[in-house]
Each structure stands twice: as structure tokens, then as C-alpha cells.
Image (cartoon, rainbow, N blue to C red):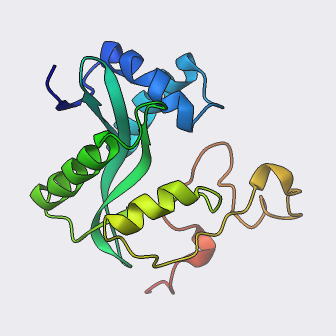
Amino acid sequence: MSRRILLAEDDRDLRRCYPVMAELRPHVGPDEFLRRVRRQREAEGYRLAYLTDGEVKAVAGFRVNETLAWGRTLRVDDLVAKSGERSKGYGGALFDWLVAFAKCEGCDQLHLDSRVHRFDAHRFYLRKRMSIECHHFTLDLKAQPERAGARERGACGGAGRRRGPSPRTRGPRST
């Protein structure tokens, strides 16, 4: 067999990728995986690339975005090689493909987060010449009590998301 890297184009491709992705994201079941990928693809341009060598050996979920802080970046959300197939070059080949894809897309940088306990992954990223640039902070909003008055201050925007500035944040009106 020969190694090939492909972009997942349909649900059949996504289903082929799921068992490998589930090793990294075991909390996401197969049906929820399909729903999330479809939703993120539509809303944020999320893509799924996979390396196959007879079967799926490695998977990467990513998106191209632009921020004030970093400019145009390729953001890797998920990168995993199948257990039992690690240290065979599959993850490295997929990573190198992501770098080439980012360059073709005119990205200035490639970014990814890695959980602090994933020491083998950290060694891999450092071998790939990545540098540790930031701390990534999180706040579990489900565990936080709702702040009194948040709705009245316009933080929740009523029943749905509010588009644009709230009336209280607009600048002075011209007369």
C-alpha cells in the first residue's frame, strides 16, 4: 500500500476517520462527531485531513483563520495517530502536510494546543521545531453560576445572539 493524505469530503470519509479521532476525543460519540464536524465545517471552515496506508492511520482537524494577534494562521484542533501505529512516521507526515497546506493558504503561522499532560505529543511538536508561545486559559462556564444582571446588561442578547453593538455601547449620536 502507499501512503496518501486526503481531505474528508463526505460522511463516509468522516466515519472512516472516527475510530482514530476517538482515541484523542473519546468523549465524542460517532453521531455527535458527525454533527460537530458538519457544524464546524459550515460555521468555521473546519477541515479533516487523514493519512491512509491501507486504512486510516492518522487524522488532523484544522481550520484557517485570521486574528489581530497572529494574522492568518492554520489552527490545528486535533492531531492523532492510531495507537499501535505511532512512531512509524504517520503523524509526522500528516504534520508536514499541514505545514505545506498552511503555506499554500498564505498562512503566517501554524498553531495548536496540547494538553499539559501529553508529554509524548510535546516532544513530537518540539522535534517539529514548534515553540511554546502561550499559556491557554480556560473557564468552565457550565460550572459558573449565572451572574446577576447579565441579561439586563445585554450580555446574553435576549433569545438569540445579538448582532452588532448593543445600544449602550454605541458612540454618541450626532444630531
Q: Residue at x 54, y 17 (%)?
A: 31
Near-viewer residue (44 or 81): 81
Please state the horizontal and vertical placement of residue 149, each as a whole percent of the image: 85, 65
Residue 112 appears in the picture as rendered: no
Please state the horizontal and vertical placement of residue 80, each as a whole percent of the image: 44, 40
Q: Hey, which quadrant is residue 82 in on the image?
A: top left
Please state the horizontal and vertical placement of residue 120, each as a whole percent of the image: 52, 55
Q: Is residue 24 above or below residue 34?
A: below
Q: Is residue 148 above or below residue 48?
A: below
Near-viewer residue (17 or 172): 17
77 to the left or right of 45: right
Number of numbered discs present?
0
Q: Residue at x 60, y 29 (%)?
A: 28
121 to the left or right of 101: right
Residue 66 appears in the picture as rendered: yes
Near-viewer residue (35 or 170): 35
Please state the horizontal and vertical placement of residue 166, each as a whole percent of the image: 58, 67
The N terminus lies in which quarter of the figure? top left
Q: Residue at x 66, y 32 (%)?
A: 27
In the image, farthest residue toward the top: 12
36 to the left or right of 92: right
Q: Hey, which quadrant is residue 147 in on the image?
A: bottom right
Q: Residue at x 52, y 68 (%)?
A: 165
Near-viewer residue (22 or 52): 52
Q: Is residue 132 above or below residue 25?
A: below
The C terminus lies in which quarter of the figure? bottom left
